[in-house]
Amino acid sequence: MELPFVVVTILFCLGIYTIITQKNLIKIVLGFTIVESSLILIFVLVSYQPGGTAPILDKAYHLVVDPIPQALALTSIVIGGSVTAVMLALVIKIQKRYRTLNVDKLRKLKG
Amino acid sequence: MVKKLYKLGLVVSLGMFLFVLFSDIHNLDRTSKNYLSEHYISEGVQETGAINLVTSVLYDYRAFDTLGEATVLLTAATILAFLVPVTKADMLGTTFTIIVYQATKYLIPFIAVLGVYVIMFGHLSPGGGFVGGVVMALIPILLSLTYGIDFSEYKLTPNTKKVVEDIGAIGFILLGLLAVLTGNNFLANGQAGFPLGNAGELISAGLIPYLNVMIGIKVGAGLAIIFNSLMKEQ
């Protein structure tokens, strides 16, 4: 019963661990996306009801799941995609300017 | 070594905190009445005319939220177009066999039909403007991947895509202002007296299909701009 929440917790912690330990900027962006997908899974788990159907009322239905978390999950997916794209563009700029992706070597200012 | 252990301990303590938090979410009182979603499920079809309740939440009850969401995508596309300024396009060095070119050529009409279907039936079936827009954005992406980015930008110039995206954004706001003209709130649909029609038909649900179309072309053009900007970097 508690297993899905354990999986979500492990995914979230994996993403945070990736962000604070990895040196490569691309891997840090990957960590952000892992955290984001774990939060989308939380939305799915909150709205889950045993035996419920999708909230489309076109035929006889018995039990319908809550539509609000699904709409919020859509919002989260769109904004996550946009933020990931902007992060990757910044990574491209950093690579062009400093010729490295290692965060330890990016400490010193240049120019 | 100590630093690594420190980070690991930090993450494990965060995990324990999150597990307690999520267990509390799990043990919430499910039997108590959930007035908001109960109202959406029981009254949503009569009030908005859309049988897909997620669409009715996205484009009627919380349409202002969707406008903000679309603005985030517009901002991301604009930032990418500014951040990655490229005057010379990068040709992909690969050439495929004729099978790939012909398969792409025959696939594109089907993708277009699927995207238009998903957008137009957003209030009747799973899908909607965002999903359909992503499907439509596959067309320029496929062109860029197989025929090279020069051909893709020759067929659909970046200025065209930018204009299409602006048409989507401005059209959404103008459709919302239609409700203001009738003396109601911004983006009101059923309350403003737009004809809702019979629930379950294609032309029904007042403003919702038109808002879907606007969001669809906006998301499609925005994603195409984002992909080409990221790929063009030399």
Image: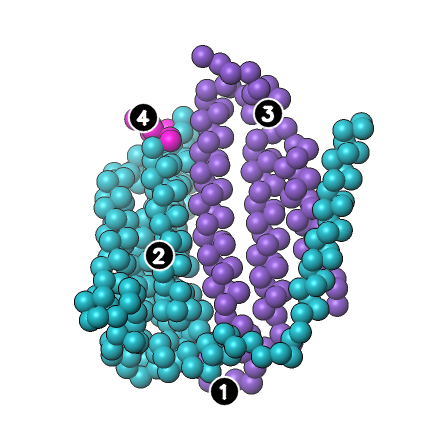
Q: Is residue B95 visible?
A: no
Which chain does the numbered disc 1 sit on?
A
Mark carried by residue A60: 1
Q: Colour of chain A?
A: purple
Q: Which tag is nearer the camera, tag 3 or tag 4?
A: 3
Between disc 3 and disc 1, the foreground one is: 3
Neighbour tally class for label 4: few under 14, some 14-19, many 20 plus, Cα within 10 Å: few
Give residue A89's quadrant in the image. top left
In what element is the residue under mark 1? Answer: loop
Amino acid found under the numbered disc labelled 4: Lys
Mark 4 and mark 1: span between their CA atoms?
Answer: 58 Å
Crowding at label 1, few (<14), some or many (≥20) Cα neighbours within 10 Å?
few
Q: Can you say which quadrant of the picture contains the C terminus of chain B?
A: top left
Q: Earlier in the sequence, mark 4 or mark 2?
A: 2
Residue annotated with mark 2: B67
Q: Is residue B231 magenta?
A: no
Q: Taking B26 as reference, is B216 above or below it?
A: above
Quarter of the rendering containing residue B54: bottom left
Are labels 3 and 2 on one chain?
no
Q: Which residue is mark 4?
A: B88
Magenta highlight: main SS? loop
Disc 4 with disc 2 on a shared chain: yes
Identity, as a three-letter code, of the amino acid under mark 2: Leu
